[in-house]
Image (cartoon, helix red, strand yellow):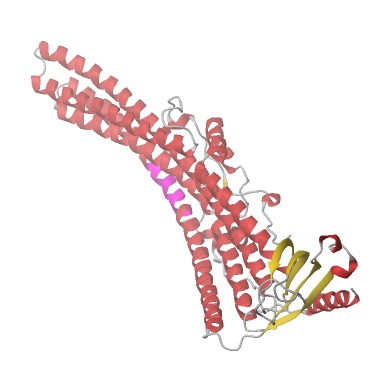
Amino acid sequence: MKEVKGAVVLMMALLWLGCVMGPEYQQPDIHPPENWNDMTLEGSSSYLPITIGQVPEADWWRTFANDELNELIGQALDRNHDLRKAGLRVLEARAIAYGAGAGLYPNFSVDGGYSRTRRSETILVAPTSGAPQGFAPPGANFDLWRAGIDLRWELDLWGRIRRGQEAFAAEAVSSEMTRRAVMLSLISQVGQTYFQLRELDEQVEIARRNLTLQQDALSIIRTRAQAGLVSDLDVTREEALVAHTASQIPELRRQRAVVLHQLEVLVGATPGTLVIARKPLRDVVVQPVIPVGLPSELLQRRPDILEQEARLKAANARIGEARAYFFPSLSITGNGGVQTSEFTQWFKWGSRNLTIGPSVTLPIFEGYINMARLEVAETRYQQMLEEYQQTILNAFREVADVLVALQTREEQLASQRQQVSAARASRELADIRYHKGLVTYLEVLDAQRTLLAAELGVVQTERARLTDMVALFKAVGGGWESDHLTHVTAGP
């Protein structure tokens, strides 16, 4: 037993003195844009609700001050199947990372058995393989009772197992960042779909309001036509406009049903089961103040950037794992227990047996597989590095695009509101001039069409502005509390 203890102590010392092959991970140098505070056209406008330098809250969608939207997002986070699948992949990756460190520890197994053996009468030398036959004479019959413990322990002198463990742990972090990206995308999709639903509600309301006005006008024109004050042509033109406006309402209702079905799928509900009362867009949300954050915070918050960096760490660890294959592997193997041909002697001290010792494997020539393995690991690291840098560039581009879009939406919306006011005044003036016989009814129809198009345009732009706000929250990584970040470790 002293020999066994000495061997174990020696192996532990070698393991402790062992080195880890491969480069240590170093975060690549990234140069964020210097003009971060001036990424909107001509600088920040006075009415653009953006605060540069602040970080979004974890529940950033609550800034829209809509309880119904908050509830829908909460349902989506609880019941969406894509998000659940991403969560299960995280659990899978964590389990793999946890098991990756098992190779650092000894592997013990217990086995036992019984065999009945008859030795050949025509052979004088015991076989070199098969069940041991001891000193049994030819033709002898005997029993063999055995029980023992097998040991297998590979000493990670060059860090191959530890580098693999490091890679799996980084891949588990990457999986968690993928789940966060799915969550952020889901929240954004629910918000944008909800705003689209409310846009259609307001468009239906505008169409119905205009339809009512047009039907009233048609009634007046018919009365005037019966009195001979206007021609039947004016009646038919107004009837055509009424029919056209009326035909828009069923189409808008169809589009609303389709969008509602999309929203139901996002929140994990069966299509046709979600009931959302109709409300115009302007009555359901407020315009929030959007904190953008600084470039360094963006790099630490966007899930896709963190996911790519975790993959880069895993690829870096694989390089060390590949280099370790060039060096000898040292293992301790052994087995021990009791073995006897008499069951009554099974547990006596004299029936014990023990075999233990180190084994060394030194690669000499393996068909260049080790060199190929290292080259693959190094080229994959370079690929991950390019993807990481490209992801960062795309992140800054997305933020810049949405900031510009928000400012131009505000400018567009201001002009469209002026257009609605002018179109409404033009329609009233056209009605007055028509009743005085100064213009034909074509001018009245044109004024009505212009007003309807202008009102619908305002609603579309308001919805697009809200969609851009959601897109900006997504582009800057949303936000979550620091204690919600997952730290994945590998090994028992």
Q: Quadrant of residue 433?
A: top left
432 versus 120 height, above or below: above
Q: Nearer the viewer, residue 46 or 184?
A: 184
298 versus 19 height, above or below: above
Q: Quadrant of residue 127?
A: bottom right
The N terminus is located in which quarter?
Answer: bottom right
Residue range of the region highlighted in magenta in the rendering: 403-415
Asked whether the viewer can see residue 29, the reply is no
Q: Is residue 298 left or right of residue 428?
A: right
Q: Position of residue 40 (x, y in %)?
A: 48, 56
Q: Is residue 71 left or right of residue 489?
A: left
Q: Residue furthest bottom?
A: 364
320 versus 392 height, above or below: below
- Check if residue 404 falls in the magenta segment: yes
- Check if residue 313 falls in the magenta segment: no
Q: Position of residue 459 (x, y in %)?
A: 38, 36
Q: Position of residue 290 (x, y in %)?
A: 56, 47
Rendered residue at 34%/28% (across/down):
204
The C terminus is located in which quarter?
Answer: bottom right
Q: Position of residue 209 (x, y in %)?
A: 32, 23
